[in-house]
Amino acid sequence: KPTGIPVQSGTKSFKNIIDIIKNTKYFENSKPFIVHRLDKETSGVLIIAKNRKYAQLFTSLFRIRKIHKTYLAIVYGKVEKSKKVMKDDLIYYENNKKIVQKAISNLKIIKSNDGYSYLELNPITGRKHQLRKQLFNIGNSIIGDKKYNTKNNTKMSSKNLMLHSYEIKFKINEKKYTFRATPPDYFRNMLKVKRLNF
């Protein structure tokens, strides 16, 4: 999924991923079922089922945490080396009711310097805006995140959110599947600009 396109139609968005793919050759005799989401601003691997049977299978695999997701992110600041896991109680409000959800993500520093860090992230739970909120909570918000922004800088150094869904792994009937998406050009350019590339 490219950045800037929502997975589902919301109130504001006119064009979403489902509208775009439902008329392609992949869905000739079927219709797309959403089994998980990526934020509108997030790029990368997205699973879409072609029938109800697989939609239910994937939904249950997500629920029992048998789908392993790896994200790549470029964040502000140097993330502490000791930080391997982020555990939070994320709070959000639904119909004026306060809801607290446990959120757990594993974190690995791929490379960092004084100003920025390049991270590999594995969310264990699947909460809304989980990685964005958790990185904000530790003081290392994702570059390009307008909502959860530790820098309070009105001038964003990037119009793109530097969060990419890189890999999804799962097993069906003992067969292992791995899907990967190369990070977009703007992401790779940012790594160069921030001197985080190899």
Image: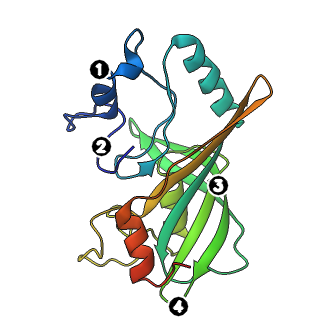
Q: Amino acid at mark 4?
A: Asp
Q: Residue furthest front?
A: 25
**Label 3 Cα crowd, 10 Å radius (few <14 / some 14-19 / many 20+):** many
Instruction: Specify the color scheme.
Output: rainbow
Residue 90, placed above or below residue 158: above
Mark 1 sits on what residue? 23
Which mark is in front, 1 or 3? Answer: 1
User: Dividing the image into 4 quarters, which one contains the N terminus?
Assistant: top left
Which type of secondary structure does the marked residue at label 1 adopt? Answer: loop
On the question of residue 138 being in view, the answer is no
Q: Position of residue 65 (x, y in %)?
A: 70, 37
Q: Position of residue 18 (x, y in %)?
A: 34, 27
Which type of secondary structure does the marked residue at label 3 adopt? Answer: strand
Q: Earlier in the sequence, mark 1 or mark 3?
A: 1
Q: Amino acid at mark 3?
A: Asn
Decide: marks 1, 2 in contact (CB < 8 A)? no
Q: CA distance from mark 2 to mark 4?
A: 33 Å
Q: Earlier in the sequence, mark 2 or mark 4?
A: 2
Q: Position of residue 70 (x, y in %)?
A: 61, 53
Q: CA distance from mark 3 to mark 2?
A: 23 Å
Mark 4 sits on what residue? 114
User: Dividing the image into 4 quarters, which one contains the C terminus?
Assistant: bottom right
Q: CA distance from mark 3 to mark 4?
A: 23 Å
Q: Amino acid at mark 1?
A: Asn
Q: Residue furthest top?
A: 29
Q: Earlier in the sequence, mark 1 or mark 4?
A: 1
Decide: marks 2, 4 in contact (CB < 8 A)? no
Residue 196, placed above or below residue 176: below
Mark 2 sits on what residue? 5
Which type of secondary structure does the marked residue at label 2 adopt? Answer: loop
Q: Residue at x 54, y 73 (%)?
A: 118
